[in-house]
Image: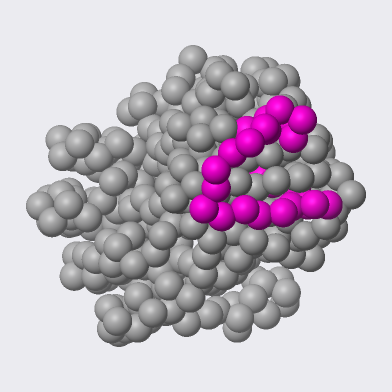
Amino acid sequence: MRTIIKNIKELVQVERQPKLRVCGTDMAHIETIKEAYLIIDDDKIAGFGPMSELGEQHADNEVDATGRMVFPTFCDSHTHMVYAGSREIEYIDKIRGLSYDEIAKRGGGILNSAKRVQEASEEQLFEDALQRLDMMARYGTGAVEIKSGYGMTTEAEMKMLRVIRRLKEASPLTIKSTLLGAHGIPMEYRGRQEKFVDLVIEEMIPQAAAEGLADYIDVFCDQGFFTVEDTERMLEAGARYGMRPKIHANEMACSGGIQVAVKWDALSCDHLEYTGDAEIECLLHSATMPTVLPGAAFFLNMQHAPVRKMMDAGLPVAMASDYNPGSSPSGNMQLIVSFACVNYRMVPEEAINATTINSGYAMGVSDVLGSIAVGKLANLYITKPIPTFEYMPYAYGENKVEQVYIKGRRI
């Protein structure tokens, strides 16, 4: 089936020579075409250019995008969007001044979500998550990485991963799954967390591998969670089963998480509120994507990762939603673009690169998604009538997306 989108006011994020990621000062540049067309053959982008060059073309479906812009869909490279129940009471506790650590020590936080996931049925988790995916797609997301981590027992972690596998089958979105067995330390393992690390290594990783449930492995390597030594043990075990790391790092402190991510060739290291010169230098000589999660920093009122310093040093930066019930209860990537500009002083071009091509790299899909390029999957959205592409971060809270196409089909 051939679809032609005509009269596009501006076609945004086009690539003539596709890249896997964009680094440093290059992040401030995107290519666009005004008064453009786009051709989709089946599930892939087949061509694009100015309307003046379109000529006669056969099409099974024509779309008139007069006054509207076309963007590649967002790639959300860090989410925890399989969960059971919200945590608004903890939200009130935060307003009243309790810290993330204090809430966790009272059995809240990750432990609260773990208890609910353990009690929930697989069907309930699947149906709730499918609705969340639909909402994310309506706001322009076309690819999502989903972590386990709210199980904290082998049985519950595998239940979460099986839900993610069902989502891959049921949703048109591109989905990657990550085993995050080491998201927190269960109460019964407090004071002997090495035994819980043993459980992750001896049970969770082999079982996830045996069932083909995980694309990646993740560890929360940070103050109050898992040490560098714990992390290395688990990453080594994951490597034996072909699981590349994606690491939670340096959200609470300079934990050594960034260095261990680079050492183990992690695809990304995420959060990064505490990132100094040594960490930036380490990342510069790696293939690891620094990934910032503005929603969590906003919701927890945390210090911001030094994004400008990272980019000035020549690093790429990705941004993702961290969609989860405790610290970032939103999967709206348009809002992340706005946070990028307001809180991290990124220009719109940098924010777009961070949430498309670079976040695609951070989940291993930038070869087929994250930009408008011939041969890539036709994952794109058509905006409502908007004046400029800079309007996307400017009009925060408003859904600017009118139509979403995933693999060439409108959803």
Question: Does residue 292 sit above or below 403 in this rendering?
Answer: above
Q: What span is in magenta? A: 48-71
Frontmost residue, 402 versus 123: 402
100 sits to left or right of 44: right
Instruction: Give the vertical position of 309 relative to 399 (above or below).
Output: above
Residue 384 figure quarter: bottom right
Pinpoint residue 306: horizontal percent, then vertical percent.
70, 34
Q: Residue at x 80, y 44 (%)?
A: 9
Residue at horizontal 26 percent and vertical 51 percent from the top: 214
Question: Is residue 248 rendered magenta in the image?
Answer: no
Task: Determine the residue positioned at 75% across, 45% down.
Answer: 8
Which residue is at the front of the view, 204 or 122? 122
Residue 52 drawn at (x, y percent): 77, 30
Q: Is residue 29 left or right of residue 85?
A: right
Viewer can see residue 38: yes
Q: Is residue 198 visible?
A: no
Residue 190 occupies quadrant = bottom left
Left or right position of 86 against 392: left
